[in-house]
Image (cartoon, coloured by chain):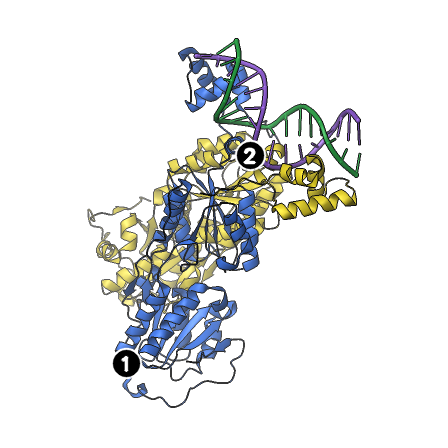
Chain colours: A blue, B yellow, C green, D purple
Amino acid sequence: MDARQKITIKDVARRAGCGIATASRVLNRSGPASAEVRARVESAADALGFSFSAMGRALQGGRSMTIGCLVPSLANPVFAEAVQGVQEALSGSGYQLLIASSNYDGEADNDAIATLVAKEVDGVIVTMVAPEKSAALSDARGRGLPVSLMFHDPIDGFVTAHVDNFTAAREVARRFADLGHRHTAFLSLRFSSSDRSRNRYAGFRAECAARGLPDPVLIELGELEADRPELLADSFASLKDVTALFASNDFLAIAVQKAARLMGKSVPQDLSVVGFDGIEIGRLLELPLATIETAPHAMGRQAAQTLLEMLQGKACVQRPPLPFDFRAGATLARPRAESRDDDQGTAWPPSVPSLKIAQKQG
Amino acid sequence: MDARQKITIKDVARRAGCGIATASRVLNRSGPASAEVRARVESAADALGFSFSAMGRALQGGRSMTIGCLVPSLANPVFAEAVQGVQEALSGSGYQLLIASSNYDGEADNDAIATLVAKEVDGVIVTMVAPEKSAALSDARGRGLPVSLMFHDPIDGFVTAHVDNFTAAREVARRFADLGHRHTAFLSLRFSSSDRSRNRYAGFRAECAARGLPDPVLIELGELEADRPELLADSFASLKDVTALFASNDFLAIAVQKAARLMGKSVPQDLSVVGFDGIEIGRLLELPLATIETAPHAMGRQAAQTLLEMLQGKACVQRPPLPFDFRAGATLARPRAESRDDDQGTAWPPSVPSLKIAQKQG
DNA sequence: TTGTAAGCGTTATCAC
DNA sequence: GTGATAACGCTTACAA
């Protein structure tokens, strides 16, 4: 209702009885000014409650001092933590964060990038469905906009802050194999829209193959099943042979345990479960979750630091992947004796309602 | 390195062989233009890969089409979800979100507000340590900037999207009392910097008093203890009488169970635990968490909708609190028979290392 | 139908 | 030391 007009530097100058250039110099300490004028300007600014318009500055300076960040969702704590890391790395740099999220939608990704570009961000930090295929992203890069990726495994000309998903997943397979598991499964949400999930599956499968184990069963969930252990349970009734399951993230790993419980299977006696990400809460569970511990916070920090370097015109090189750790937990154990080495045929039903399940061929 | 110059509407106009006003009209469909010129302008824009500068527009139009959002932290899923809700409510409105976080620091809160104002956001959605005391916030409001609060219980002239913390907490006390618990405790992180925690404690205590129960023991944790069940366990060794514990959020509720386990206490036989917030994961635990279920997502949506209405100049009225629900879980049960009605003296040690513990007087 | 020009808030340049 | 003034990218009178 009472939107009072904005106080601009003009108002300050008028009140101080000087030119706007002088006011600007005083307020920015960017040039000479007599003590007297300086005092007048400062008290005028104070009295008026003046503060600079970042927009005016940006327009004139060519830099908005804003960097854009696109993540699939903030509801996923992994991304939320990464963004938090970005914020931290940026704090003190003078840059502000403009955040967008796409809800794992490739189209929305492109729109978001376009919007960020329109806002004249000075650089972007991005996790999206398919950066290598995004017209908006390559367009932005073509215009000279610094781009820093997060979570993605290395892609052609981009720099990325990442963890080596392939190798980390191999580690899980190694653990399973060492304990004597033969029949495994990989559980994923949005397999097709996440290069991370795909790389994890690839690594997992590669190591299984290297050890002469059958290919892991690939189970791709829809959004629905992930939140409904009952639905999940339905589908697992079929996986009789499977004694070890690798979930592509910790939430799935926790949800699948609930599902197992519903079907009377106990973890880890009947089914070993390992997750991915290493979210804090996994540690606090009655059955602490075995998982690959990653550092999303550090990923955010690194992505931001890389971007800051690009903004300073430094040459930017792809850094090595951030470390991961296998976190031992209570959800991983040897398979029951009787279920070992029982390799007769795949207990694989032709179809499972409302689930897209596919077993990759070796 | 190769920061190609930006394509402005001037470039488009030049290439199309027309004035910039015409180009603007065509591209915005905001005025007449002959079919011929229209075509020329459009193909020129296309060829050049032109896109508008939101900044130029904002500067001229007086509105940045950006709204600012300040939350304590994105690492807390409750706030992350709320922000997600804000994003959703804003999508399609043409407004972008500029996000800041303060890490629960009152000073950072003020800085963040100031920065958002400098960015010329058209409105702000805020959760901060002390909105009623923030100079920056009242200043912003004084300048006519629409302000919409989230999570905070109603404060003088502000509108807020909230849940009735006091009443929700009373509900917890009621449940405890009905089951026969007499000695309770309230566990909080950052009690002093969160009006929500304070209101929850107040409601909890009020209902205990109304039922003739002793005041709940107030336990305020530092950041450290919350992540270290060992440390937590140390402090609980003292709370011999307490049979029921209300944690001011679900993470604490989960952490405290781990601590209880470490000391050989079993939940809920020896200790009932109820959380607050209703995070999804609580449902999936082996011992599903009893908690007050709130709707942070809806809170974000409502805060955003309210702000949009303010931006449209509509009168905005404080809406009633969003609903909460008591979610039954396996962490709440009757106290053991022998521990009931044993009211002899407070089992309260003079000091517990590294914890600020205080018992409020009735 | 079209183009010129003023103005949004700032800073940088350049005379004074 | 100081103050006009041009420029940044855009929209919108207003004039042609």
Residue A179 lies, with reference to residue A291, above or below; the image says below
B193 or A67: nearer the eye?
A67
Residue A156, picture quadrant: bottom left
Element class at badge 1: loop
Q: Is B165 displayed left or right of A322 in the figure?
A: right
Residue where numbered disc 2 is placed: B145
Residue where numbered disc 1 is placed: A180
Residue B324 in percent (x, y) is at: 49, 56
Residue B52 in percent (x, y) is at: 61, 42
B234 or A186: nearer the eye?
A186
Chain of residue at mark 2:
B
Residue A338 in percent (x, y) is at: 30, 88
* Pointers 2 and 1 in contact (C-beta within 8 Å): no
Q: What residue type is labelled 2?
A: Leu
Q: Residue at x 46, y 33 (%)?
A: B114
Chain of residue at mark 1:
A
Q: What residue type is labelled 1?
A: Gly
User: Is residue A80 visible to us here?
Assistant: yes
C5 or A88: nearer the eye?
C5
User: Is residue B332 visible to us here?
Assistant: no
B200 or A100: nearer the eye?
A100
